[in-house]
Image (spheres, rainbow, N blue to C red):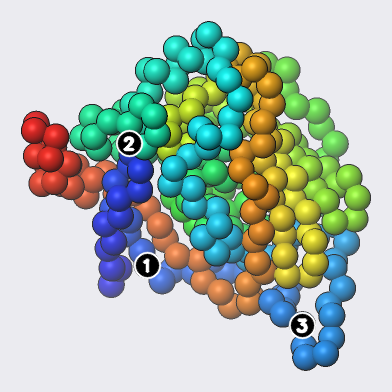
Amino acid sequence: MPSRLMASIITLVAVLTFSSVAFAQATRPQQSSAPTGQTLAVPRHDLSGMWDAMGAGVHPLGFSHLRPAFTPLGEKMFRANKPGRGITEVPVALTNDPLDSCDPAGFPRSNLFELRAVQILQTSNQVLLLYEYQRVWRVIWTDGRELPKDPDPTLYGYSVGKWVDDTTFVVQTVGMDERTWLDNSGDPHSGDLRVEERFQRVDHDTLKLTVTIDDPTVYTKPWAAGDPVALKLQPPNREIKEMFCVPTEMEEYKRLMANPAAGR
């Protein structure tokens, strides 16, 4: 039977349901560590496997301390958001964080908040990322296509990627729905947002991820969202857990705890 864990994380206080349902390992088996006295070679053009940020990808305070200044429109968008953390923090019951209603995190928040286990699968023309948090996936096209000029906005955007060397995979993503937030402190983005991810396999068992935000409508210059995150390769029998925000349980939490605490 699933066990339930109620967790308060910044603006969002989410009740997450866990189960032991596993993803089948769809890539070839890999060892998570080298035999004693041996060093495993770094595979060429290969990110496949189960990777875990080991908590390094969890940023409850957001990235407001790192971002550059807002444009005038960006400042207005930021002030309209009511996060549970940061310089415009409000009580949990008053936040308008989309995650507080169990909406999807969207991209790039899927990388900047609750980045935990992620399984990466490669096909002849795609790289697929399957995230533990909210049990969602992304498609990154690798067939040489260009990014769309005027994409319909979606929660996770439209992504294309290419290998720039034997161990570095660079992804460009556009077309993100501006209703999503970048982080827990309410940093916004517009429909002009462009995100670059750099996945660098620094050794057989370590994958370094760097995320760069470029949104000239909201920010005065591009910026790196935090330090690079090191993800560790997991054994091929590692299970990926369910990790959901459950709307009915969230409403019960608000009724019993958050709303009374805010005097509502």
Which amino acid, by three-letter code, is at mark 3? Ala
Tell me if residue 233 comes above or below residue 138 in the rendering: below
For label 3, the SS is: loop
In the image, farthest residue toward the right: 165
Residue 215 vs residue 136: left or right? Answer: right
Dot 3 crowding, Cα within 10 Å, few <14, some 14–19, many 20+: few
Residue located beneath label 3 in the image: 34
Q: Quadrant of the N terminus?
A: bottom left
Residue located beneath label 2 in the image: 84
Sequence-first disc among 3 and 1: 1
Tell me if residue 65 comes above or below residue 120 in the rendering: above
Residue 89, percent from left and from top: 33, 31
Question: What residue is rendered at 51% in x and 60% in y?
Answer: 55
| Quadrant of residue 166 within the rendered picture | bottom right
Residue 157, percent from left and from top: 60, 32
Residue 118, percent from left and from top: 58, 58
Which amino acid, by three-letter code, is at mark 1? Ser
In the image, farthest residue toward the top: 72
> Is residue 191 among the parts visible in the rendering?
no
In the image, farthest residue toward the bottom: 36
Residue 168 vs residue 80: left or right? Answer: right
